[in-house]
Amino acid sequence: MSSNSGPLHVEQRASLREHNTFGLPAVARTLVHLGSAADVRRVVDHPLLGPAPKLVLGGGSNLVLTRDVDSVVLKVEILGRRLLREEADAWIVEAGAGESWHGLVAWTLEQGWPGLENLALIPGSVGGAPVQNIGAYGIELQDRFDSLDAVDLVTGRNVTLGAADCRFGYRDSVFKRSGFGGLAGKSVITQVRLRLPKPWQPVLGYLDLERKMLDTGNHAPDARTVFEWVCAIRRAKLPDPAVLGNAGSFFKNPVVSAEQCRDIIGREPEVVHYAMPDGSSKLAAGWLIDACGWKGKTVGRAGVHDKQALVLVNRGGASGAEVVTLARAIQESVYGRFGIRLEPEPVIV
Ligand code: EPU
């Protein structure tokens, strides 16, 4: 890894298979390993790398590679984690964007700074967490976000962004958007700061966690117990990318108006749905896909996970094109039966 003073670590014709959790084959014409914010500035100042289009890669856990990549791939490997400061009502923790997200969650708990336990075992890196606004079991990254540092890929300047600048949405942020105002490919997140509120309060409203409380009889779990419950719940239904390639949920849960929701319930009384504060409803995409008979199916070398229909998997040797073909077939059948267009969650390249 490059240090503040060493040369840039650049690879030509680098395989990306090990750098995406789907295990899809693709070759980067140029791959640059970034060990520090100074490395990012070196890329910006470089006569060839500086002006080239960029693809920023974190843990590769939310990515579908359908082709070789001509853009310069920037692999963020910035490490380090520390308690930045302790306030009366929060711990502020800072971590390098290249740290493992789950590693950070486990470490903060060990240090006695709870608050991230519901987000345990989410694959990917610390820098990817705000890009995606990762979420699980009733908490989203934005609920624990303080601020982040990024390097602008045009000017080489370091910028600090607060929550409002990140424009967080459901599995969305300014870093996922291209086009005017979007920052996709335009900046590299280097450090992320999280705000873990004191006193700690468990978030136990999600059905799977309520079930754990009933099953164990423990209605006042500590943070470590919630962490273990979340890990157990995830292991039971989500495939481990080290064993079966995948990118977590493949589609977002669609949000529909109250009227559309009533219409669907009229036709499909079993549909799993959650009321949103603004009166709209979020439907469980996994349920819609499952209802269309996709769970456990295989098309080519891509498939639908047998325990969670929202997760597409690489059954071994799949190409990105096979995954996308399967995804389209699922979108068509869900549209045909429910009139709902499912939107992919991962970035498709
Ligand atoms: N369901 C089915 N069949 C299926 C899958 C799900 O009937 O094959 C039903 C379940 O029984 C449940 C409902 O659909 O009633 C929701 O399922 P689940 O609790 O597994 O959650 P999800 O909505 O499918 C979302 C996130 C996950 C996150 C979990 C827990 C999205 C797109 N996905 O999944 O996030 O871990 O909630 O909070 O919002 C990810 O983003 O990659 C991800 C894994």
Image: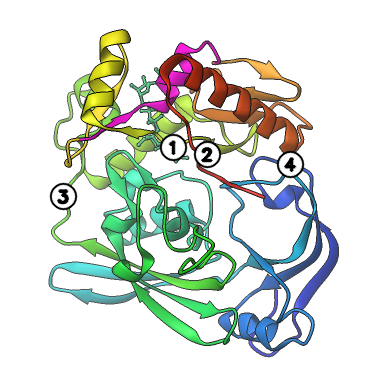
Q: Can residue 307 be seen in this view?
A: no
Separation of residues labelled 4 and 1 (CA atoms)? 21 Å
Q: What stretch is highlighted in magenta?
A: 280-294
- Quadrant assignment for ligand 1: top left
N-terminal of the two: label 4 or label 3? 4
Image-quadrant location for residue 288: top left
Per the image, the residue denoted by label 4 is 24
Specify the farthest residue to the right: 13
Per the image, the residue denoted by label 3 is 201
Q: What amino acid is labelled 2 in the image?
A: Pro
Separation of residues labelled 4 and 3 (CA atoms)? 40 Å
Per the image, the residue denoted by label 2 is 344
Q: How crowded is mark 1: few (under 14 residues within 10 Å), some or many (20 or more)?
A: some
Image-quadrant location for residue 329: top right
Task: State if disc 2 and disc 1 touch (CB < 8 Å).
Answer: yes
Residue 252 image label: 1
Q: Can residue 221 be seen in this view?
A: yes
Residue 211 lies, in percent from the top left, at: 25, 23
Instruction: Decide: is 178 above or below 65.
Output: below
Separation of residues labelled 1 and 2 (CA atoms)? 6 Å
Separation of residues labelled 1 and 3 (CA atoms)? 28 Å
N-terminal of the two: label 1 or label 2? 1
